Amino acid sequence: MIGVSPALVLFRQVERFFRQVNCFFRQVSPFFRQVNQLSLQVNRFLDQVNCFFLQVNQFFDQVNQF
């Protein structure tokens, strides 16, 4: 019986490793998608807050002109 070549054994180990890495990323991907969505919502909120303070600033600029 012919033994399995060391190159094939190494290839199978590397393949197994990448399958595990792929599985890991499939598991964490939804979490990071949710984090990304939350980040976008926070960003939109901060844009609105920024817009509000710009309007307040413009108001006080006009008040200061009098």
Image: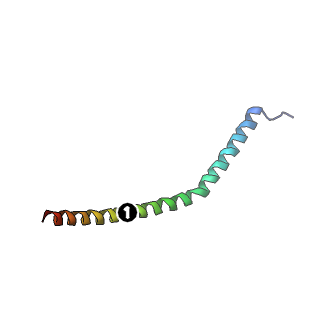
* Position of residue 41 in the picture relative to residue 65 (left or right): right
* Position of residue 44 in the picture relative to residue 29 (left or right): left
Mark 1 nearby-residue class (10 Å; few <14, some 14–19, many ≥20):
few
Q: Which residue is drawn at the image coordinates 66% and 48% (left, top)? A: 19
59 or 15, nearer to the observer: 59
28 or 38, nearer to the observer: 38
Q: Quadrant of residue 9?
A: top right
* Amino acid type, callout 1: Leu
* Position of residue 51 in the picture relative to residue 36 (left or right): left
Asked if 59 appears above or below 25 in the picture, the reply is below
44 or 5, nearer to the observer: 44
Q: Residue furthest left?
A: 66
* Position of residue 21 in the picture relative to residue 47 (left or right): right
Q: Quadrant of residue 4?
A: top right
Q: How many marks?
A: 1
Q: Quadrant of residue 51?
A: bottom left
Q: Which residue is drawn at the image coordinates 24% and 63% (left, top)? A: 57
Residue 49 location (% of width, % of height): 34, 65
48 or 62, nearer to the observer: 62
Residue 34 location (% of width, % of height): 51, 62
Q: Residue furthest right?
A: 1
Q: How is the image coloured?
A: rainbow
Q: Which residue is drawn at the image coordinates 87% and 35% (left, top)? A: 1
User: Dividing the image into 4 quarters, which one contains the C terminus?
Assistant: bottom left
SS of the residue under disc 1: helix
* Residue labelled with disc 1: 46
